[in-house]
Amino acid sequence: MACGIMIFAIFALLVATVVTCVSGTRLLQQGFPVSRLGPRLGSAARARRPPSARFYCNGGLARNARNDFIVSLKGGYDLDLVIDSLERVPENLQTFQQLDMFSATLSQGDVLALLRNEAVDYVECDAKVSVGAGR
């Protein structure tokens, strides 16, 4: 019985991950970050640059004005320089130098800037996910 519950929990987590990734991809395809993520940042040329990073987030979380995000960089880029490129120091900033990642509470404008930053591999909503038997 415990094995069956464990298999179900793993399956449910896998389905939730796929749904989240597909939802994030659809938001990018619909132009969500460009059309709905706040004011344009930097020069006009930078503001028109299409997103180069992947975006994983479900629609409800992505539409909040401020949210917690995990940001992963491509290899060879400096984490501190990417953080310094934002308009202000993010709240709840935690850096993971060995993993080339950081987590923080970011505004929609910050998310948009990160999605357009060539150093960023992906931006992902950081959210609590619970899988349980309803107890």
Image (spheres, rainbow, N blue to C red):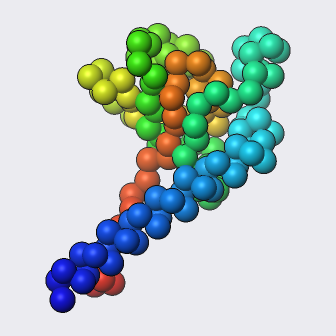
From the viewer's perspective, tell me whether residue 99 is left or right of residue 69: left
Name above or below for residue 41 compared with residue 127: above
Q: Nearer the viewer, residue 81 or 52?
A: 52
Task: Tell me which residue sits at (39%, 29%) in the image.
Answer: 102
Residue 7 x %, y %: 28, 75
Task: Tell me which residue sits at (59%, 31%) in the image.
Answer: 53
Residue furthest left as drawn:
2
Task: Tell me which residue sits at (59%, 18%) in the image.
Answer: 118
Q: Is residue 60 visible?
A: yes
Residue 108 x %, y %: 64, 37
Count of number-bearing discs: 0
Q: Nearer the viewer, residue 46 or 38?
A: 46
Q: Nearer the viewer, residue 95 or 48?
A: 48
Residue furthest bottom as drawn:
1
The quadrant of the image that shows the C terminus is: bottom left
From the viewer's perspective, tell me whether residue 65 is left or right of residue 127: right
From the viewer's perspective, tell me whether residue 8 is left or right of residue 106: left
Task: Tell me which residue sits at (30%, 21%) in the image.
Answer: 97
Residue 51 x %, y %: 68, 29
Q: Is residue 110 visible?
A: no
Name above or below for residue 16 compared with residue 92: below
Name above or below for residue 50 compared with residue 14: above
Quadrant of residue 73 in the image? top left
Residue 61 x %, y %: 58, 54
Quadrant of residue 128 in the image? bottom left
The quadrant of the image that shows the N terminus is: bottom left
